[in-house]
Image (cartoon, rainbow, N blue to C red):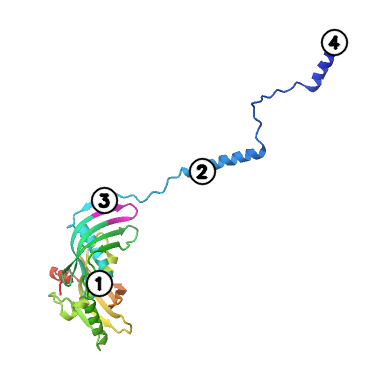
């Protein structure tokens, strides 16, 4: 009987095969959906890490701020750019603003942007020679393939202390009521003389020229108006008076004399505007004006 049982057990094991033993700690392979999710998670993590590896954008690099000698050309040039800017904003036939002296100046080189000057200067009204306090200005000369006008920010503490409205209104009404149109030429003349009745038009020419000098300025220029070759009042039905100017600008670094024609409008309410500008071909026969003539640009009346 025992032999029979032994044979039966042996035959049963041969039919079913050996049992497989699985460790309770071995994990089953992930289901199909779980595997895809795992791959997607890995891809997302890699993409996130890749994005994090990009360098962050940084502001334009700046060089250390350099102190400038207030009496040297770089500081004076930047201050005169601010002077031109102020005249385009506040100038009139009876108000012409100018730099009295430069108090302090610094230069900051901004990589990829340009050269920024910070200048403090004393301002004065050039017709009356009256001091008008101090101005603080930032002048940025942009860099680029083509020259761009300087960018100017300026604040002054005494711009409103001189009131010229009464003089401006009187001249305006006189010109509106006149039957003849004003004209003049060679202001000043070869002796530096300006007829009293032409001084407002000399000053108006200086203000109008400031629009051109501001636009044409760069780090290597220093502009002044040397002479009004001629000025002619134009017929106008508008409230604004219109004048055609031909002026000589003196670029004092190169000693070049540059001709410009300007169409200028003015009235007390709207101020000075330059409607048209036309650069004239270089004059090979022109020479720099005498120093006394150049200085009379902003001479007191």
3D distance between C-alphas at marks 3 and 4: 109 Å
Image quadrant where one finds the C terminus: bottom left
Residue 134 position within the rendered picture, expressed as x and y whole percent measured from the top left:
21, 62
- The circle on residue 48 is 2
Pick out the residue farthest to the bottom.
Answer: 179
Quick one: label 1, few (<14), some, or many (20+) residues within 10 Å? Answer: many
- The circle on residue 91 is 1
Q: Earlier in the sequence, mark 3 or mark 2?
A: 2
Q: Earlier in the sequence, mark 1 or mark 3?
A: 3
Q: Is residue 109 magenta?
A: yes
* Residue 43, placed above or below residue 201: above
Q: For the point 63% across and 40% down, which residue is it?
A: 36
Instruction: Write down the quadrant of residue 43 in the picture.
Output: top right
- Provide the residue designation for mark 4: 2
3D distance between C-alphas at marks 1 and 3: 32 Å
Instruction: Write down the quadrant of residue 151 in the picture.
Output: bottom left
């Amino acid at each position: 009987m025992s032999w029979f049982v032994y044979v039966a057990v042996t035959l049963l094991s041969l039919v079913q095969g050996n049992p497989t033993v699985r460790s309770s700690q071995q994990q089953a392979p992930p289901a199909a959906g779980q595997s895809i999710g795992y791959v997607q998670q890995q891809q997302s993590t890699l993409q996130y890490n890749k994005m994090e590896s990009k360098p962050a954008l940084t502001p334009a690099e700046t060089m250390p701020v350099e102190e400038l000698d207030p009496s040297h050309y770089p500081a004076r040039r930047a201050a005169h750019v601010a002077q031109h800017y102020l005249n385009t904003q506040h100038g009139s036939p009876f108000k012409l603003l100018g730099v009295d002296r430069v108090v302090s100046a610094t230069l900051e080189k901004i990589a990829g942007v340009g050269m920024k000057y910070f200048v403090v200067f004393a301002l004065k009204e050039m017709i009356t020679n009256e001091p008008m306090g101090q101005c603080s200005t930032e002048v940025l000369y942009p860099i680029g393939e083509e020259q761009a006008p300087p960018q100017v920010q300026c604040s002054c503490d005494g711009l409103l202390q001189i009131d010229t409205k009464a003089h401006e209104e009187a001249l305006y009404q006189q010109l509106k009521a006149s039957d003849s149109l004003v004209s003049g030429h060679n202001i000043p003349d070869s002796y530096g003389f300006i007829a009293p009745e032409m001084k407002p038009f000399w000053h108006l020419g200086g203000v109008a020229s400031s629009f051109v000098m501001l636009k044409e300025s760069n780090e290597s220029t220093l502009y002044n108006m040397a002479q009004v070759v001629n000025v002619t009042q134009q017929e106008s039905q508008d409230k604004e008076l219109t004048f055609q100017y031909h002026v000589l600008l003196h670029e004092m670094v190169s000693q070049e004399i540059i001709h410009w024609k300007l169409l200028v409008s003015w009235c007390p309410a709207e101020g000075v505007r330059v409607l048209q500008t036309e650069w004239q071909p270089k004059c090979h026969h022109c020479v720099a004006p005498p120093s006394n003539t150049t200085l009379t640009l902003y001479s007191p009346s």
